[in-house]
Amino acid sequence: MAGVILLFGRLKDAFGVASIELPEGVGTAAELRAMLAHLNPDLADMLKAKTVRIAVNQEMVADEAGTRISTADEIALLPPLSGG
């Protein structure tokens, strides 16, 4: 079964959906970021921005290269928060 990536805020608006399928062959959070930027050239700048955070199992990822992900994980892409 394929994993799901939850999208929030501007990312949800940009993709036009609340979730997308985890691409095959992705083993780390860093690989996920790079793969999504490659698959979505129009959104590459947004996806490459370090202000977009990745959460795995409801914990913010600090070391994307060292954080392994699998289809069993809950993965979320979070845009920068703004408030007022």
Image (cartoon, rainbow, N blue to C red):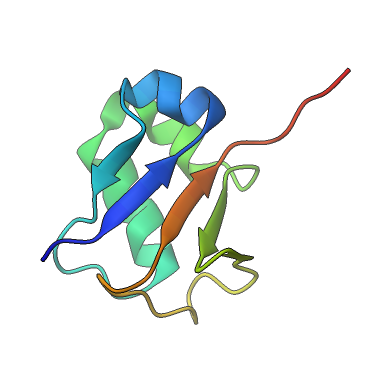
Residue at 16% over, 69% down = 25
Q: Is residue 57 placed above or below 76 in the rendered structure? A: below
| Residue at horizontal 19 percent and vertical 56 percent from the top | 23
Question: Residue 26: x percent and y percent?
Answer: 25, 68
Number of labels in the image equals: 0
> Most extreme residue toward the right, as rendered?
84
Provide residue 9's location: percent of width, then percent of height: 55, 27
Provide residue 22's location: percent of width, then percent of height.
23, 56
Horizontal side of 18 relative to 25 (left or right) equals right
Nearest to the observer: residue 58 or residue 42: 58
Q: Give left or right: position of 49 versus 80.
A: left
Residue positioned 29% across, 75% down in the render: 70
Q: Pick the quarter of the image with the C terminus.
A: top right
User: On the image, which quarter does residue 59 sit in?
Assistant: bottom right
Q: Give the position of the N terminus as an image quadrant.
A: bottom left
Q: Is residue 4 above or below residue 39?
A: below
Residue 31, quarter of the rendered image: bottom left
Q: Position of residue 48 (x, y in %)?
A: 48, 44
Residue under the image location 25 percent in, 70 percent down: 71
